[in-house]
Amino acid sequence: MITALKFTLLLLALAFAQGLHYNYIDELDKEAGTVRAVQASQYVSLWPLPQKVKILDLSFKLTSFNIVDAKESSAGSSCSLLQDAYRRYYEYMFGIAKRQGPRKSRLTGPSELTELQVWITSPDSECDGYPSVTSDESYELSVDLPYAVLKAPKVWGALHGLETFSQLVYEDQYGAKSINSTAISDFPRFAHRGILLDSSRHFLPLKVILANLETMAMNKFNVFHWHIVDDQSFPYLSRTFPQLSQQGAYHPYTHVYTPADVKMVIEFGRLRGIRVVPEFDTPGHTQSWGKGQKDLLTPCYSGSKPSGSFGPVNPILNTTYDFMSQFFKEISTVFPDAYVHLGGDEVDFTCWKSNPDIQKFMDQQGYGQDYKKLESFYIQKLLDIVTTTHKGYMIWQEVFDNGVKLKPDTVVHVWIGGGANEEMGKVTAAGYTTILSAPWYLDYISYAQDWQKYYKVEPLDFDGTEEQKKLVIGGEACLWGEYVDATNLTPRLWPRASAVAERLWSAKDVTDINDAFNRLSVHRCRMVAHCYDILCICISFYDKL
């Protein structure tokens, strides 16, 4: 009953967006200093907005409808990724019911659309592969008689096209599922469009992670940055070092991610065109590591005696690098993505400064009292280790700032606010690929419609050449877990992250807040209809329903 009610609300919202123009006074736009009157968007309920879209008033009914492979497609019935997507999107659009089979004698009306034919045009559909930073995510969608056609070079574009098609379906004033004649040509502006979730500070049950992967797909995000461990807990169950989670997790059995769990997350993401990039942050943020790995962390001193506390990873012991070699060898086999995030941020030097063995090593190396050089010494050895696993790496900006020698394909992650544009200029001037998160820390909350400030961000708004700006491959919305757990993660994240999704997907000139407000209102209803607890961005919208 509840699910049916949510679905009915969504259909009503889509009907208003498709065919009914409504006006209502929204809250004061403080920046503009005016009261906004919002009308139905000419782009109905599409989110994020495609690059090129034309929607006509001509509508078709979908009373007898199937999603099928085009005869010319290189991905046929053996492509389980697409077959799973057909089933999933059919249920999204028409409810959980038996999919329609072939019709033998039923006649259709002159305005009835019976099929969406999906045509993968490239000889290699990548159906059995994994998405990557170079994946082709483009697609073209034509909705017209006698059937709709979705063309994409690869399956990744087809997945996005199916999402777009589902957003076009609405219920007309007579209760019939309908869709308007539409032509869309679409591709993402940026290749890296990510969400960071923190499963260490508060353990996130598997179902919460999977639900957010589902919502990410609805918003055309394509990277799940899994900040899986940190100081607070080590929930990753390592085959090589099982004691890490046995000692470092909140609970060794109920609050861990088993190999089967990790495999499920990766496959669930793959079926939705989402990469899973794990982060194992060192040398700081490692207190939970030390509980299960003796001598990994640096003993802190109070005067001439150990204080009993521990600091960052001990960078002067050979055993540290032996451990890291074995650990990241395992990570390279568990996570198929070409990249692993190595962190490298917020290293507190206090413990290193207190330790006499560290001080002696500093003197031997000629580092003086410059502990950034010691950090760089550790990071450089770690990068060499990861390179042997044939993985690329992403790092937080401090690693670049401290002058560590990086591989040319390193991805530098800019996160520190207050100088992000200057940092973006420095990193790209040095020739490194960059992603931006500084303006998109969604764990920071504020009153009213703060999604607007995330929407208004322009990732390329820094001084630099065109060649520098080509090095910016996208960004990530980050949701850190100090005050976020399974009970409030989804409403904290959505639909605020949807604002980031459109900024990273749509054209640079898609900046109309009024139009975005209307489309996002409908998109939120759509996400709610999928049984997710999505934060409300408006009250009066529902009053009008």
Image: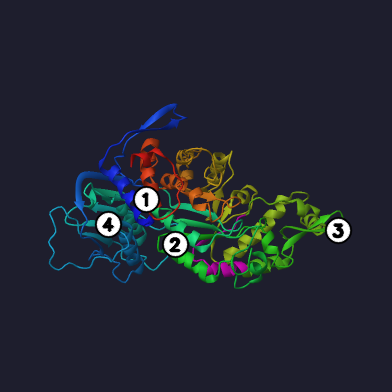
Q: Would you call the spot at circle 2 few (<14 residues within 10 Å), some (14-19), or many (20 or more)?
A: many
For marks 1 and 2, the one nearer the N-term is 2
* Amino acid tagged 2: Gly
Mark 4, secondary structure of its residue = strand
* Amino acid tagged 4: Leu
For marks 2 and 3, the one nearer the N-term is 2
Q: Would you call the spot at circle 4 few (<14 residues within 10 Å), some (14-19), or many (20 or more)?
A: many
Which residue is under mark 1? Answer: 526
Which residue is under mark 2? Answer: 269
Single out the mark in the foreground, 1 or 3.
1
Of residue 275 and residue 123, the one placed in the foreground of this image is: 275
In the displayed structure, would residue 350 be above or below residue 265?
Answer: above
Mark 1, secondary structure of its residue = helix
Find out whether residue 513 is within the magenta segment.
no
- Cα distance between the residues tagged 2 and 4: 22 Å
The answer to whether the residues at label 2 and label 3 have Cβ atoms under 8 Å apart is no
Q: Is residue 99 left or right of residue 524?
A: left
Single out the mark in the foreground, 2 or 4.
2
User: Which residue lies at the image location 57% right of the left edge and 46% below the top edge?
Assistant: 415
Which residue is under mark 3? Answer: 305
Which residue is under mark 4? Answer: 150
User: Which residue lies at the image location 58% right of the left edge and 53% below the top edge?
Assistant: 481
* Amino acid tagged 3: Lys
- Cα distance between the residues tagged 1 and 4: 22 Å
User: Which residue lies at the image location 67% right of the left edge and 61% below the top edge?
Assistant: 288
For marks 1 and 4, the one nearer the N-term is 4
Q: Would you call the spot at circle 1 few (<14 residues within 10 Å), some (14-19), or many (20 or more)?
A: many
In magenta, the rendered stretch is: 327-343
